[in-house]
Amino acid sequence: MQHRAPFSPKLSLAVTAGVILAATLANAVCREPPANHLRDSHGALDMQAQMVIVNKLLAKRDFTQPPLPIDPLTWNKVVVPAGNRMTPQRVELGSKLYFETRLSKDGSVSCATCHDVTRGFTDQRTTSEGIGGALGQRNAPTTMNAFLMDPQFLDGRAPSLEEQAKLVIINPIEMGMPNKQATIDAIQGDPEYQRMFKAAYGSRPNYEDLAKAIAAFERTLVFLNSPYDDFVAGDTNAISGKAHYGLLLFYGARCISCHQLDSENPLGTDNDFHNIGISARHQNFKALAQEALDKLDKGDGLHGTDKLAIQTRFSELGRFLVTNDPSDIGAFKTSQLRNIGLTGPYMHDGSMKTLWDVMDHYNKGGEPHPYLDAGMVPLGLSEDEIDALVAFMFTLTDKRFIDQNRQMMEQQRKLAAKERPFRNTDMP
Ligand code: HEC
Ligand code: HEC
């Protein structure tokens, strides 16, 4: 798909961003030191320790009310499905399930293994590692604010958080449960779960309500209170002069045409799909697409697509696996830019280690090839301008992670000083 949205320098758009929240969350700042001795073989922090941190992060929130800055109408009509209204009991059950390693075949993996509270709700790996150390093809996006993504997954193959959760548990290499019943068998003997399902949904443990509860918990992961938001709300000192310059460049370099960032689109994504030339470096897309169509014909619907996306080299076809539309070859969902400082490495294949790498890629206009989105053009940004855009992106991290954000920025800065593999050395 190609979208050449008209370039609009109007900063006023951003100023309307719904950013009234602030003080309520400011005192819940997370300053946990990284407890490396408590990490498992996947690199995830101990589940109990993660639960303590997440409870602290989400303290004092009334989950039955629409969270700021989400418009209440959007929250009630769009975000929260009629069949899964938010109640404290559902959130509590979902929270327990999110950290539950018994939902995986070998008992070693939970959602929080790959969406770890202390790693920006990702795994900070190139691509994710599931049961038995199996590596998938895709980089894990964050579950922070994922409830605003529509649809779910980098290729949009799941329409909702509920459906997303149902797929990952029975994906053979992620959580690896053989089927839905085996998943329920793993927890239904536990009186605690029996009590919690009853309180949340009036039911015995079952797969549908399990997915619903996890989704309800994910709808509490609202991390939209950043220095950038203070800036657009009028606090001119909230971000540095350099970051402010980066914000102007974010409009000037037309990042905004795909990464829409305003009160209607607080995540910085148009929720649409574009081929920005990430995997073009090593693909013969046309041949791969034909091969995939043959496989999909014989496959088992959504589960077939899920396996191709996670486990095979067809993963690189992106949105095409879902729509079979040639214009979607190699297209992926525009990533959210919220908390981007915490969620590297970047892109669907995790191929870029720093935001400087990302900028080098855009500065070249991506890798030229027939499926490249028409919105990708060489930018000719100077090093100072690249630094400014990176500085701006680091202001999009929620204030509860301010220390971690600063650490990550320093780490990335050091790495980028050593290597810039995507930089175009021909450019001035
Ligand atoms: C083995 C690692 C792993 C585990 C375990 C895992 N995920 Fe993920 N998650 C990923 C990867 C990789 C993707 C991207 C896959 C894709 O888009 O094809 C993803 C995508 C997502 C998305 C989509 C976000 C977006 O921006 O579209 C959500 C939501 C999510 N996971 C939630 C969960 C939940 C809930 C669980 C537990 C039931 C879970 N994940 C378990 C690795 C994992
Ligand atoms: C044509 C649409 C488009 C434009 C223009 C665009 N992006 Fe993107 N951006 C995307 C898509 C699509 C992805 C995900 C690509 C993938 O994973 O393969 C992405 C990914 C990213 C990521 C990585 C996110 C992550 O979590 O992995 C960053 C950072 C980013 N863009 C910043 C920018 C900046 C800064 C600009 C302007 C210089 C920009 N983008 C311009 C569509 C666009």
Image: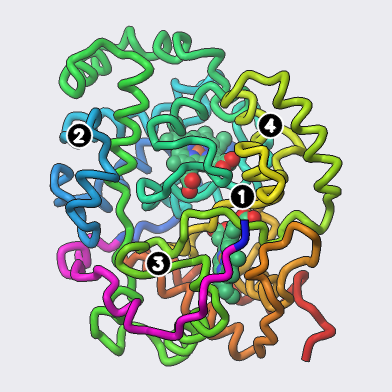
Q: Are marks 2 and 3 in contact (CB under 8 Å)?
A: no
Give the residue drawn at x 79%, y 67%: 368
Sequence-wise, the earlier of marks 4 and 2 is 2
Give the residue drawn at x 30%, y 81%: 231
Residue linked to disc 4: 308
- Density class for disc 2 (Cα within 10 Å; few <14, some 14-19, many ≥20) is few
Q: Quadrant of residue 288?
A: top right
Residue 54 % position (x, y): 31, 46
Range drawn in magenta: 3-29
Residue linked to disc 3: 397
Residue 344 appearing in the image? no
Query: Which quadrant is home to the N terminus?
Result: bottom right
Residue 351 % position (x, y): 70, 57
Sequence-wise, the earlier of marks 3 and 4 is 4
In the image, 114: left or right of 118?
Answer: right
Residue linked to disc 2: 85
Residue 83 % position (x, y): 24, 28
Image height of 213 relative to 148, above or below: above
Give the label, 3 or 1, closer to the camera.
Answer: 3
Q: Amino acid at mark 2?
A: Arg
Give the residue drawn at x 61%, y 47%: 139
Q: Amino acid at mark 3?
A: Thr
Q: Amino acid at mark 1?
A: Arg
Residue linked to disc 1: 125
Whether residue 26 is in magenta: the answer is yes
